[in-house]
Image: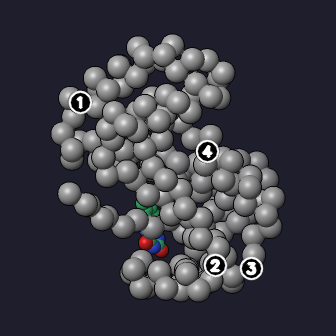
């Protein structure tokens, strides 16, 4: 299918048949998720994939009791970070340094630039900013699922921890 045909095929599915998504297909979808852009490349979210049926059934009441949660074969949770501090930025610099094989010190200017930007934001602004990045990843995932002809339903839940 062309990309446009895949997007026309996609809709927010209300019931699932629970058929297992082949491993290679799941891998493709999650790789697309990883390829989503984010501001500074910081990806201020964690992605948790729950394939275990018992766990999904336990979680269903926490997602407005929507049957898709229990019936699906995979629940992909995009958990936006509550806060972003210099610690997360330092960890990100470490990851880049390892991936590119460069000394972490060579990224000091980049780290200072990010730290300077996030320091100017309130906790609430940071959470909103982080959530925006998360939704980009969700969008990539939904498009990838459609292109693989895998049914999906997006849903959101607001939990703010102070
Ligand atoms: C952030 C977000 C949250 C949504 N939450 C739900 C939801 O909890 N349950 C559901 O069935 N659909 C949910 N939807 C799907 C929308 O209702 C749906 O995309 C919209 O009505 C357009 O229909 P379509 O996607 O079937 O074309 C959500 C969509 C988004 C983007």
What separation in Å lies between label 3 and label 4 (alpha carbons)? 24 Å
Q: Earlier in the sequence, mark 2 or mark 1?
A: 2
From the image, tell me which residue sits under label 3.
Answer: 19
Residue 153 location in percent, x, y? 54, 69
Q: Earlier in the sequence, mark 4 or mark 1?
A: 4
Mark 1 and ligand 1: say if the CB distance to the nearest ligand atom is below 8 Å: no
Residue 71 location in percent, x, y? 61, 84
Q: Earlier in the sequence, mark 2 or mark 3?
A: 3
Q: Are marks 4 and 1 in contact (CB under 8 Å)?
A: no
- Quarter of the picture containing the C terminus is bottom left
> Which residue is nearer to you in this view: 100 or 118?
100
Q: Nearer the viewer, mark 2 or mark 3?
A: 2
For residue 52, which numbered disc appears in the image?
2
From the image, tell me which residue sits under label 1.
Answer: 119
Q: Earlier in the sequence, mark 3 or mark 4?
A: 3
For residue 153, which numbered disc appears in the image?
none
Relative to 152, 129 lies left or right: left
Query: Does residue 128 lie above or below 60 as drawn?
Result: above
Quadrant of the rendered image containing residue 14: bottom right
What separation in Å lies between label 2 and label 3 (alpha carbons)? 13 Å
Q: Nearer the viewer, mark 4 or mark 1?
A: 1
From the image, tell me which residue sits under label 4.
Answer: 34
| SS at mark 4 in the image | helix
């Amino acid at each position: 299918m062309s990309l446009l045909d895949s997007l026309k095929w996609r809709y927010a599915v209300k019931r699932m048949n629970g058929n297992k998504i082949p491993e290679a297909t799941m891998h493709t979808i999650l790789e697309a998720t990883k390829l989503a852009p984010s501001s500074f490349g910081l990806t201020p979210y964690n992605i948790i994939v729950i394939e275990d049926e018992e766990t999904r059934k336990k979680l269903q009441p926490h997602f407005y009791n929507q049957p898709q949660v229990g019936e699906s074969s995979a629940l992909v949770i995009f958990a936006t970070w509550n806060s972003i501090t210099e610690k997360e930025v330092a960890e990100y610099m470490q990851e880049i340094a390892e991936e590119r094989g460069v000394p972490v010190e060579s990224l000091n200017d980049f780290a200072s630039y990010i730290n300077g930007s996030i320091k100017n934001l309130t906790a609430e602004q940071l959470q909103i900013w982080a959530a925006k990045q998360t939704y980009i990843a969700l969008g990539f995932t939904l498009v990838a699922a459609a292109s693989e002809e895998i049914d999906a339903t997006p849903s959101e839940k607001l939990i703010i921890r102070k």
